[in-house]
Every structure is written in structure tokens, then in C-alpha cells.
Image (tube, helix red, strand yellow):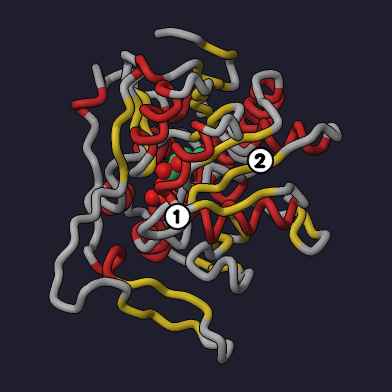
Amino acid sequence: MLVGKKPYRTVWWERGTVKLVDQNLLPFSFRIASCKTFRETARAIENMTVRGAPAIGAAAGFAMAQAVLAGKTKEGEKLIKSTRPTAVDLFHAVERVANADDALEEAQTIADESAEACERIGKLGEKLCGARILTHCNAGWLACVDWGTALAPIYMRHRHGKRVFVYVDETRPRSQGARLTAWELRNEGVAHAIIADNAAAYFMKRGEIDCVFVGADRIAKNGDFANKIGTLEKAICAREFNVPFYVCAPSSTFDRKCANGDKIRIEERDEGEVLYQRGLCDDGKIRRVRVCSPKSHARNPAFDVTPAKLVTAYVTERGVFRSF
Ligand code: MRU
């Protein structure tokens, strides 16, 4: 993707350092984070400087290469696998690099394959993509090495000059839709509107949404899949209003060892993400403010599992699959 006319990937290797587009600073500033050791890269995955299943897969691969080159293979493997539990891309990448003859070459291959898979998903998904699309969370360029999963078909359609309008779920609590997807779409010049998380059924019922495109963090053997919290609700609404619901994901997101969605471990994050929001104040400063009743507590599951029966089709780099 071009940012300020310069081509960027979200994750890359530069002379032993892992470079990441800092997603915690977007949309207010575009900065590159530098992680010199596998511990720093693992920390960046954990604190979501880098996030999104294929992007954390690529970052985990490079982190593992840093660990291997430092002679800390076992320690690195353990630490990187402990950062985030749900997206399986991370576990696949760590294992591939730990078992490779050339760790760095393997990590680079993972990143390159990821970018190529997403481009292919874009080409295949474009054929299914209507003009008015709902998306949840950020399954775009930022969540991958390049292109995105759910957003790749939208970018292809837009680049081919066809009409596109994207309804962007804000995606509380971390607001990946409002902060990241909206920033990406603006950067690419794609028309869109951010909608409150609870507004999707309203627009579907009015016939204003032609299709739903989402990504995935782990797809079980039976087609059940984990994705950002709120995805299940959108899938139920889509079924109710006969709106096609597509899941876009590379092969690295499929977990053949996981029989069904009940077996997927769901990350539960700090309650502070629900109770507080960070944002740009009128005086130009970024501040964290409490947005909930002062003495209340919160629960914060980061993902939910959508059953395969609610999915119209899975778009992968290997083809479009309507059933499992
Ligand atoms: O917690 P996040 O921001 O890492 O969650 C990301 C998502 O749920 C994405 O939808 C998913 O990784 C698919 S991205 C290509």
C-alpha cells in the first residue's frame, strides 16, 4: 500500500530489526516502530503495535528468526507463543521458522506468501463483492503484510473503477474499524461511513448492505471461525436479512488440528480497554478518558466464534469454498 506515495508493508525486516507500522498511534500519526530483539517484537505483538492475524503471523516469524539468530530458539518459541492465543497464523509461523534450515529466509517467505495470498484473495473475492459492503474490525492492509483479507476484494473493485461504499463497524472496545479501517479506506480513496457497532441490522433491514466481508483469526476444521468480537452478531443479522456473508482468509488461518469452534481459545483482554478510550482532544493532545460509570467493572472478550452454517463462502488464495 502507498502511504504518502511511498510503498509500505506493515511488517518487514531491516538488518536484524523488525519494523512495524505502529497501529497504536493510528489514525493520528503514522510512525514506524523498530524492534531490535525477539523480546521487543513479542512485546509489540502483545501490546498490539502490530495486530491482525496474518500481520502477527509475519511479525511472529521475524521475531522467531531474531530468537534463532540470538541462539535462543526455545526461549523465543515459548515467549512468542504466549503473546496472543487466538490467531493461529502466529503459531504456524513460529513453528515454521523454528524448524527451518534458514530461519530468516523462512520468515521472509512467510511474509511474502502472506502478501501474495491476500492479493489473490482480492482477485477471487472481487467477483463476489457488491457495491455496498459491511465490514467488521480491521481486516485490511494493516492486519496483513499487504492488501488485507476482507478489504482486498474491495480495493480490487475500487481499483477497477467500480462503485464501492463501505459501512465500517466501529468495533468497540479498541475501535479497529473506526481507527484503522477508516484510515486505510481514506488513504485509498474508498467511500465509506463509520457506523456504531449496533447499527448494522438497521442498514441491512433497509436493504442498504449488499454483502458482508470479514476476516478470521482461526478457522476450525468444520468451518466455524473466530474473529473480532461482534462478528457473530453480524453473521446472525446477515442470515436474518438474506445478506451474503463472506469470510476471507489465507491458508495460514486454517487450523486443521482444531475440530470445531468450541475448541478455539478466546483471548480475554484487560477491562481498561472497555472502560477507557484514547482519542484526540480539541486542544490537539491525545488523552485517555474514562467512558463508563466510575465504579463499574467490565468484561472484554476479544473474539467470538461464528458457526459455519452462517457463512455463505470462504475466500482463500486457493479458491472460493461454499461449504466444508
Ligand atoms: O485483536 P485484533 O485487532 O488482532 O483482531 C483482528 C481481527 O479480528 C481481524 O478481523 C482478523 O485478524 C482478520 S485480519 C486479516
Kindly report the distance in space between the C-alpha atoms of the residues bearing marks 1 and 2: 25 Å
Residue 289, percent across and down?
A: 36, 80
Q: Decide if residue 163 is in sight here.
A: yes
Task: Answer with left or right where residue 221 lies relative to residue 135.
Answer: left
Q: Single out the residue that lies furthest toward the front.
A: 206
Question: Between 37 and 177, which is closer to the camera in this rendering?
Answer: 177
Residue 37, percent across and down?
A: 43, 64
Q: Quadrant of the C terminus?
A: top left
Snapshot quadrant of residue 305: top left
Residue 211, percent across and down?
A: 57, 27
Amino acid under label 2?
Trp
Which residue was labeled with disc 1? 66
Q: Decide if residue 103 is in sight here.
A: no
Query: Which numbered marker is on residue 147?
Result: 2
Please name the residue shown 35% across and 17% down the image.
308
Residue 231, percent across and down?
A: 39, 37
Tell me if mark 1 has few (under 14), some (14-19) or many (20+) residues whose alpha carbon lies within 10 angstroms of its own: many
Disc 2 element: loop
Question: Between 33 and 236, which is closer to the camera in this rendering?
Answer: 236
Q: Nearer the viewer, mark 1 or mark 2?
A: 2
Disc 1 element: helix
Decide which of tag 1 and tag 2 comes sooner along the chain: 1
Tell me if mark 2 has few (under 14), some (14-19) or many (20+) residues whose alpha carbon lies within 10 angstroms of its own: many
Amino acid under label 1?
Gln
